Amino acid sequence: MSVAETVISNLGAYTWNARVYDTLALASRIAAAVKNRGNVIRIAYHLRELNKSLEKLIELVNSAMKGEIKQSPNAEQVTAQVLRSNADNFEQMYRTLDYIVEGSRRAGLTNNSLTASSVRGLQRRIDPIANLADWFDLASQPDAVGRIFERAKRERESGELTDLAQVE
């Protein structure tokens, strides 16, 4: 069982989906609100809520990766399709967060004392969310990842090394 499968099975697939979808729904609501910059106080509140939700989600994944969350003996088998679905959800979350940060910048919310720190917090969480999307995507393709490592091993053994300075 891969680490990504362990993360989802430790949390329970339905519980995990609820957390991911709740966070994605909140991000989508903020993306709609930022577009028209209606009520700055409401946007500031929701931005803080979203930051907390993202922080908890990332901490939950990290805790599960470290093995700090005990796996349920009744956990359902996690399939490649479930992992792929999670990759898609995190990719959507990444795009939504990027839209919120850029929309906030255009709407002047990065210069507002109520919203600036929350927007910076979202900006710091964009890369970890993108990394989770990539991680779940790779976990859904264990054969392809295995082939990549096998090829690298063969190339290293045969002396076909490439200088990183030559790679673009």
Image: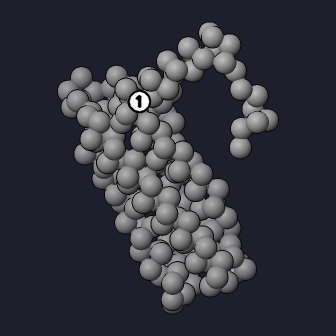
Q: Is residue 81 above or below residue 89?
A: above
Q: Is disc 1 surrounded by few (<14), some (14 to 19) or many (20+) residues within 10 Å?
A: few
Q: Is residue 14 left or right of residue 64?
A: left
Q: Which residue appears farthest toward the right when viewing the image?
A: 165
Residue receiving disc 1: 144
Camera-side residue of 132 and 43: 132
Looking at the rendered structure, the secondary structure element under dot 1 is helix
Camera-side residue of 164 and 47: 164
Q: Is residue 55 visible?
A: yes
| Residue drawn at 63 percent across, 61 percent down | 123
Q: Amino acid at mark 1?
A: Ala
Q: Is residue 3 above or below residue 32?
A: above
| Residue drawn at 57 percent across, 84 percent down | 40
Camera-side residue of 127 and 49: 127
Residue 4 coordinates in the image, percent (x, y): 40, 33
Quarter of the figure with the N terminus: top left
